[in-house]
Every structure is written in structure tokens, then in C-alpha cells.
């Protein structure tokens, strides 16, 4: 395809559009491999040992309810994204959807927010990679430098993404499938150990803290972010108008069911443990021991370690494709429009994304920050970018449907609910006033957006002057 956008009208349906491939390998990915992109960016196997204990510290016995609500919110946003994905295929993901319907400044904000979100999520999971690397290496009495481990994760992800997206997708799918399977085994054994009885205390609202559940929901959202990343494969997926929206909805739904089941089982398993769930550094080692299969604990930790690498890879792939299209639209340097002649991947954009993910991790390592704190801090920053992009897509869908005279009452409720949910999620990060360093994160994020818009303004003025 050589045109800027090619369109086609389906019988009795909306107009659909396909952006050019921009040098990427068209039709290279099967539906399973497209789903693998979203699943690997979510990295579902990392949530049970890392994020669930943090949510439990806030929501307590209501942890499962927090995840149920978070799943509902993400499916709500997913429906908005899928509505666009059924009509448009492009490597630009959510940025293209907002660009079609909103003024240029808002679509630019969505692009920079999404790129920020993918890169900082990659930084977060590199921190998780550090944390679990030391857990796995401790029995071997090995303590390599943290900077070396972070470099291995970043360089490895950049190299695989640079080589071939098809190889990358297959690798991500395999790694995550193994990790999730190991966790599922322990969950099944724990449920069997408890006789499959239903723990009503986890859903009895009269004795649960509504405030705790609400705070837990906001943290649980981080477990889902990136579920939309299959949309970055619009030029490479087969039948993208069908496979991508399915991947978006299914990834949110499948991951959500897995999270709810895991946090329910973890809460149940730690109910009679000497250590509470939020105080456990390796919850699945404890659960494995309680289930009588302690040998699975270290194996699960190793599975989570490689899943962290897969998530880093998925984020680098997604960020590079968003950056590629941003460069084509003048939001980034024109050199980033280049793709590798043989591999047909955005090589320069991928290397830059991996480098940008590594740099803040390296800075925090030099300050003596632990891998777990890097995971939590960078993950919190990433949420701001995702919530911004999700909210703007919901608004863009309303304008898009109104322009095509297809805005129904149901669609108004959908887009309105999704927008309000994202605004409330962002507001929750300002009140109650969080402790340092979390209180500084909103200003870091908005400072980043201000610099991006300043760069856009200067480059626009320069272009006009040249003309």
C-alpha cells in the first residue's frame, strides 16, 4: 500500500481504513500471535506474586472484588478500543484512533502518553526482572551487579524485537504460557487442598472496607495496562479488523479471570498462614509449601523471571511501532521512520525504546533503589500514560460515531462511562495525598507532556518558517 490511508466500505457497515505498512511485514502474525502481544504486555504471571500482595495491603479480604471491578473497567475501555479496531488497522494503536476524531493537539497528547506508558512499563518490568533474578540466584549464592542484569533484560528485548516480530511473538507466547501454567497448577492444588469450598468472607460487602476496595481497584488497573497493545500490530496481523479487536477483549477478559482466581486463592491460602499475604516476598513459594508441592515454588519464580523478560520485549515492540507512526506524522524525528530492509522491523525505533526503558532503571540502580521499588514506581508512572490514552480514546469514539451519525444512547453510555472512570482513576492519584516519592509522579508525567508539546510547537513553527 502506498497511499496514506486506504479505505473500503463494507456492505451495510461503517467505512474501514488500512494505513500503509510503513515497511513492516504485512500479514505475518496469526490470531494467536496477535493475542500473544497483548497477553505478554499484560504479563499475567507477574501479577499474582508482585501486584496482588500490594492490592491486598489496601483491600484486604476485598482483593478479589477489587480485581473484578478493575476487570470491568478495562473491558469497558476495551469495548471502545475494539470499536475503532474493527474499522481501522495501523501500527499507531490508540494514537491513530484519536487522530481520526480529535484536534491535532489531543491526538499528539495521546501519542506521547502511549509511548511514555509503554516505555515506563518496560522500565517497571525490568525492575521486576531484577527482583526475581536475585530470588532465583540466591540459592546458587550468585549476586551479579544489578546494572548488568538490567542491561541483559533491555539489550535482550531490544535485540529480539529488532530481529523479527514473528519470532518475538512466538517467544512471548511460549514464555507466558509456561509461566501461567505453573501458577495455575499451584492454584488448582490449593483449591483442591481446601476442598473447593466457596469463601464467602471475600465477597461479604458488609464487613469489607469500601475505601480499601476503591484504592485496591486503582492499583489493580496496573495489572491490566497494555492489554490494548495488539493494536500496534495493525500492519502485521492477518485480517487485523477481526483479529485485533478480538485480541483486545479476550486479553482483558482472560487476564481478568486469571487475576481474580489467583487473588481469591492467595487470600484463601494465606488466611491461616503465619505470614500475611502483603508481607510475603515470595507468596507462591509459601502457597506451594501449603499445597504440599514445595518444589514448584522455585520453578514458578523462574517462570515469573522469564515472563518479566517477555513483558519487557512486548513493551519495546509496542513502543517502537507507536514511535514509528509518530515519526511519520511529524511527532518524532524522521529517522525513526526507517525499518530494517531484511527484518522488516522498526529497528532504530526499537533500539531507542529499549534504551529509554533502560536509562531510568540504571539511574535508580545507582541511587540504590531495589528492583521491587523500581517495579512499583515506574509502574505507577506508566498508569498515568495509559489512563490518558484510554480516556482520550473513549472521547474520540463518541466524536467519531457522532460524525458518522451512528452515536446511539448505548454508545453514549459506553463512552461516557469509560471517560468518567479514567478521570476518577487519575484523580485518585491526587487525593488522598500520597507519600513521597509517589506524590511527585504526577508532576513528572505532566512535565514530560509539557516538554513534548513544547517540542511539537517549536518543530511546527520551524516547518512553517522553512515553507
Image (cartoon, rainbow, N blue to C red):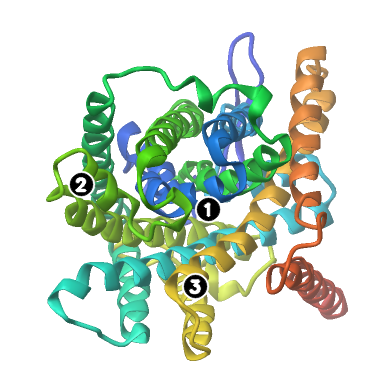
**Image marks 1 and 2: residues in contact by CB distance under 8 Å:** no
Q: Secondary structure at mark 1?
A: helix
User: Toward which corner of the image does residue 304 lie, by quadrant?
Assistant: bottom left
Residue 132 percent across, percent down from the top left = 31, 66
- Note whether residue 34 is visible: no
* Residue topped by disc 3: 357
**Image marks 2 and 3: residues in contact by CB distance under 8 Å:** no
- Note whether residue 453 is visible: yes
User: Where does the C terminus fall, quadrant-wise?
Assistant: bottom right
The residue that appears at 23% across and 42% down in the rendered structure is 290
Question: Alpha carbon of mark 2 to alpha carbon of mark 3: how far?
Answer: 36 Å
* Residue topped by disc 2: 289
Is residue 192 placed above or below 178 in the rendered structure?
above
Is residue 11 placed above or below 379 in the rendered structure?
above
Residue 285 percent across, percent down from the top left = 25, 52
Q: Earlier in the sequence, mark 1 or mark 2?
A: 1
Question: Alpha carbon of mark 1 to alpha carbon of mark 3: how far?
Answer: 23 Å
* Residue topped by disc 1: 54
The residue that appears at 79% across and 71% down in the rendered structure is 443
Q: Residues within 10 Å of mark 3 (few under 14, many from 20)?
A: many
User: Toward which corner of the image does residue 281 lie, by quadrant?
Assistant: bottom left
The residue that appears at 53% across and 41% down in the rendered structure is 228
Foreground of the two, 459 or 274: 274
Q: Residues within 10 Å of mark 1 (few under 14, many from 20)?
A: many
Q: Earlier in the sequence, mark 1 or mark 3?
A: 1
Foreground of the two, 71 or 50: 50
Q: Residues within 10 Å of mark 2 (few under 14, many from 20)?
A: some
**Numbered mark located on residue 3 in the image:** none
Amino acid at each position: 500500500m502506498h497511499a496514506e490511508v486506504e479505505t473500503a466500505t463494507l456492505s451495510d457497515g461503517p467505512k474501514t481504513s488500512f494505513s500503509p505498512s510503513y515497511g513492516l511485514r504485512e500479514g505475518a502474525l496469526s490470531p494467536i500471535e496477535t493475542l500473544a502481544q497483548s497477553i505478554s504486555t499484560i504479563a499475567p504471571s507477574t501479577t499474582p506474586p508482585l501486584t496482588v500482595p500490594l492490592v491486598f495491603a489496601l483491600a484486604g479480604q476485598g482483593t478479589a472484588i477489587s480485581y473484578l471491578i478493575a476487570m470491568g473497567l478495562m473491558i469497558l475501555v476495551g469495548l471502545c478500543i475494539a470499536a475503532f479496531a474493527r474499522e481501522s488497522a495501523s501500527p499507531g494503536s490508540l494514537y491513530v484512533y484519536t487522530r481520526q476524531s480529535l484536534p491535532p493537539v489531543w491526538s499528539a497528547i495521546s501519542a506521547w502518553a502511549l509511548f511514555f506508558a509503554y516505555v515506563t512499563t518496560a522500565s517497571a518490568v525490568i525492575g521486576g526482572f531484577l527482583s526475581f533474578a536475585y530470588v532465583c540466584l540466591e540459592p546458587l549464592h550468585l549476586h551479579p551487579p544489578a546494572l548488568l542484569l538490567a542491561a541483559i533484560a533491555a539489550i535482550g528485548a531490544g535485540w529480539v524485537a529488532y530481529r523479527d516480530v514473528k519470532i518475538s511473538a512466538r517467544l512471548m507466547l511460549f514464555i507466558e504460557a509456561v509461566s501461567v501454567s505453573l501458577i495455575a497448577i499451584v492454584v488448582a492444588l490449593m483449591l483442591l487442598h481446601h476442598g473447593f469450598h466457596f469463601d464467602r468472607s471475600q465477597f461479604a460487602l458488609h464487613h469489607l472496607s469500601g475505601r480499601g476496595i476503591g484504592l485496591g481497584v486503582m492499583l489493580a488497573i496496573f495489572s491490566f495496562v497494555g492489554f490494548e497493545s495488539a493494536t500496534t500490530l495493525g500492519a502485521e496481523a492477518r485480517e487485523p479488523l477481526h483479529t485485533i479487536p478480538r485480541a483486545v477483549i479476550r486479553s482483558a477478559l482472560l487476564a481478568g479471570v486469571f487475576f481474580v482466581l489467583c487473588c481469591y486463592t492467595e487470600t484463601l491460602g494465606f488466611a491461616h498462614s503465619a505470614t500475611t499475604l502483603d508481607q510475603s516476598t515470595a507468596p507462591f513459594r509459601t502457597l506451594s509449601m501449603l499445597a504440599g508441592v514445595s518444589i514448584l515454588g522455585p520453578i514458578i519464580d523462574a517462570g515469573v523471571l522469564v515472563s518479566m523478560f517477555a513483558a519487557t520485549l512486548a513493551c519495546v515492540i509496542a513502543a517502537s511501532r507507536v514511535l514509528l507512526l509518530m515519526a511519520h506524522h511529524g511527532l518524532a524525528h524522521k529517522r525513526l521512520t526507517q525499518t530494517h530492509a531484511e527484518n522488516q522491523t522498526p529497528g532504530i525505533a526499537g533500539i531507542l525504546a529499549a534504551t529509554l526503558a533502560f536509562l531510568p532503571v540504571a539511574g535508580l540502580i545507582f541511587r540504590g533503589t531495589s528492583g521491587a521499588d523500581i517495579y512499583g514506581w515506574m509502574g505507577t508512572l506508566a498508569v498515568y500514560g495509559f489512563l490518558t490514552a484510554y480516556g482520550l480514546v473513549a472521547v474520540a469514539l463518541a466524536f467519531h460515531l457522532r460524525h458518522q451519525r451512528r452515536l446511539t444512547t448505548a454508545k453514549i453510555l459506553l463512552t461516557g462511562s469509560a471517560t468518567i472512570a479514567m478521570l476518577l482513576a487519575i484523580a485518585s492519584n491526587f487525593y488522598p495525598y500520597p507519600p513521597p516519592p509517589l506524590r511527585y509522579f504526577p508532576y513528572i508525567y505532566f512535565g514530560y507532556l509539557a516538554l513534548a508539546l513544547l517540542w511539537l510547537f517549536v518543530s511546527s513553527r520551524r516547518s512553517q518558517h522553512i515553507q
